Image (cartoon, rainbow, N blue to C red):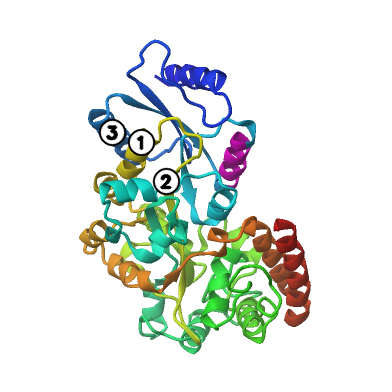
Amino acid sequence: MRSHLIWIFSVIVVLSVGGCAHQRNAFDSKIIYLHVSDWGGASADPRYNRIQDEIMAEWNRRHPNIRIVPEHIPGSSAYVSKVLTEFVAGIPPDVMQLDDASAASFIDNNTLVDLTPFIQKEHFNLLRYYPNVLDIARRGKRLYALPSDFTPMMMYYNKKFFREAGLHYPRDGWTWNDFLHDAQKLTVWPKGAYQPTRYGFLAENWMPGWIVWIWQNGGDVLSPNGQTASGYMDSPATIQAVRFFADLEKNHLAPNLSASQAQGEDPFASGLVAMTISGHWDLVPLRASETISMNNVGVVGLPQNKRQVTVIYESGYAITKGCKHPHAAWEYVKFMCGDYVQKMKAKLGIGISAIKSVAESYRNSNPLEPEFLDNIKYGIAPWGTRVENYDVIEDIGTEMMDEVLIGHVPTERALKTATARANAELESNE
């Protein structure tokens, strides 16, 4: 089968002329082939592979005349560059998986089809999706993708460590002061030791993870229209938030990079840290972990200072421009973002279904699910949904934090330099 698919794809590429890489099969005019790109490679999880096989079997049962030619591209960064290269080469996929971080790169370059005409013609019900998730691929009245699954970022905590420290479990609506108090109590530093044997929190220098601290403080890194960093990345609110985050490591409440890397495994699962920020996807490895029991894993919304907010990371499906079989492609998008597939994928626990009724049907599937679902309303999309090449801004932010943590550059000066660099990058986008 694999060699057959490779042969099909090769024929498609050879026959394509500009636009998308697919034609009716030369030997059977009734068969339509759709080239579909998504991220991910072969999985070692037999349950994942079984569910994927069941999904494709159901598609083939419902649409026997539409064959899917998949292209699985491992790694999100490799995925974006590979698909963009295919667009430049004139052989893009018919349908592509579109995530929030790269949405602007494809939408703003006029490479995707507006789904509104399909939606209006069928009276397709968009109210079934979470609005803040659906709007990630929206531009005005145009909608360029349907959402599949997503996650709000949450605070994971070790219940056992909280009990041992005599602390109440954190509850939704807790504050920065509550968080700081707990992190201090949870950090264990034996007398005479070189460093703590356990830290209160894992403060990773990953801007998609720590930007929420800026938002919680009422700051941001870009203006509302995404055109400048001046007055935002270097604002008092942003400076205060970055300083608060960096001080967690400076005050030994969080491990530095070398300490967490020396652990050689997940610092939270291994017990090096008592709290960490992550998404729904972390439930999967935690359930399989041999170093932590799920009975000791809790989740709660992120601590707030001036506002309660989190970031949503999402993926969906879009149709590319030039697709010669847009109606067939629309059927596939609806299928992948519809009830059947969403229920199947929800069994894996990697993400939350963007369909409200499906997500709610899993509310009682595990003790942590209600916390995730109740925090969806606080979620906002990352800047990558609206600003092209925002990943470069994130690189600048990461380097800025390194200057503060490793280079001991004053926070205000580091952010001023980062602001100038970010503005130069935004100007190059125009």
Give the label, 3 or 1, closer to the camera: 1
- What amino acid is at disc 3? Trp
Q: Which residue is mark 3?
A: 59
Q: Is residue 247 left or right of residue 115?
A: right
| Magenta range | 77-87
Residue at (55% x, 47% y) in the render: 76
Q: Position of residue 376 (x, y in %)?
A: 36, 69
Number of numbered tags placed on the structure image: 3
Q: Secondary structure at mark 2?
A: strand
- What amino acid is at disc 2? Tyr
CA distance for labels 3 and 1: 15 Å
Residue at (40% x, 25% y) in the render: 33
Q: Residues within 10 Å of mark 3 (few under 14, many from 20)?
A: some
Q: Residues within 10 Å of mark 1 (few under 14, many from 20)?
A: few
Q: Is residue 78 magenta?
A: yes
Q: Which residue is mark 1?
A: 327
Q: Which residue is mark 2?
A: 317
Q: Residues within 10 Å of mark 2 (few under 14, many from 20)?
A: many
Q: Main secondary structure of the magenta part?
A: helix
Q: Position of residue 62 (x, y in %)?
A: 23, 32
CA distance for labels 1 and 2: 14 Å
- What amino acid is at disc 1? His
